[in-house]
Image: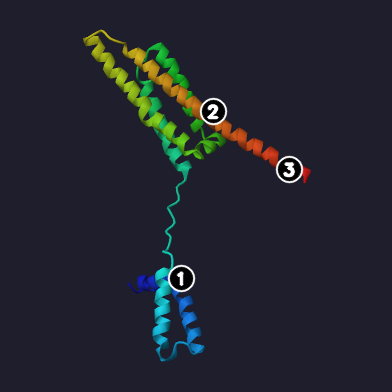
Amino acid sequence: MATSRATGVLRYLESRKNLAGSACGVAGLALTLAGVAGAYWPVVVAGLYGAGALIAPPERTAPPPFDPREELGVLREDFGRLRGYVGGVELPPGAGEVLAELLELYGALLEPGWVAEVLAAGPEAVHAVSRGVRRDVPESVDAYNRTRWWSRMAPGGESPERHLERQLGLLREEARRVTAGLHEVEARRQQTHTTYLEERERS
């Protein structure tokens, strides 16, 4: 208890409120020495200290640090589970080919190394890949499995194979756009470095 109280006192002594109040209190002492405060100098000093403490900006609590690489590590594990799940599902040839391309794109983006570091720097790209791995692909495959069973019992309408292939095709295009966006970021970074070197050479 004594240690926590001492820590609290030390924290207040280092706070902005105490520093601002102390600065105003020193100004009050200066007024006292100049003969302005008179007999009421303790009230003046205390009042100025209190005013300084009140107008001081509040202490800012730093947000907790988040490492996007840790998120990618968890996402890689989920991607491994996704591959195991879809590997045990019998898919039609067309949808199977599209899914294979999609998983290849996801795998390349999540492979540890500099590509994953570029991905980690883009929150929107990470979100897109995470959403595809954790929700979109599993839901598409699961919906195909369930709808295929119902279509056997009550045939008719658009085939579940057709829907699955379209869904996976849309996800593949999204993954391609993510990959192209990351490539563009790297290209801009390279161009910026080239410009920097050219300007340094001219100077």
SS type, badge 1: loop
Q: Label 2 amino acid?
A: Ala
Q: Crowding near pointer 3: few (<14 within 10 Å), some, many (20+)?
A: few
How many numbered callouts? 3
Q: Crowding near pointer 2: few (<14 within 10 Å), some, many (20+)?
A: few
**First in residue order: circle 2 vs circle 1:** 1
Residue at numbered disc 3: 199
Q: Residue at left 34%, top 22%? A: 140
Residue 15 visible within the image: no
Q: Residue at left 74%, top 40%? A: 198
Q: Position of residue 14 (x, y in %)?
A: 46, 71
Residue 187 vs 26, above or below: the answer is above
Residue at numbered disc 1: 14
**First in residue order: circle 1 vs circle 3:** 1
Residue 160 vs 173, above or below: the answer is above
- Indicate the quadrant where residue 153 lies: top left
Q: Position of residue 8 (x, y in %)?
A: 38, 70
Residue at numbered disc 2: 180
Q: Label 1 amino acid?
A: Glu
Q: Crowding near pointer 1: few (<14 within 10 Å), some, many (20+)?
A: few
Q: Position of residue 181 (x, y in %)?
A: 53, 31
Report how far apart the C-alphas of labels 2 and 1 lie in the structure.
Answer: 50 Å
Report how far apart the C-alphas of labels 3 and 2 lie in the structure.
Answer: 28 Å
Where, quadrant-wise, is the N terminus in this rendering? Answer: bottom left
Do the residues bearing badges 1 and 3 touch, measured as CB atoms within 8 Å? no
Do the residues bearing badges 3 and 2 touch, measured as CB atoms within 8 Å? no
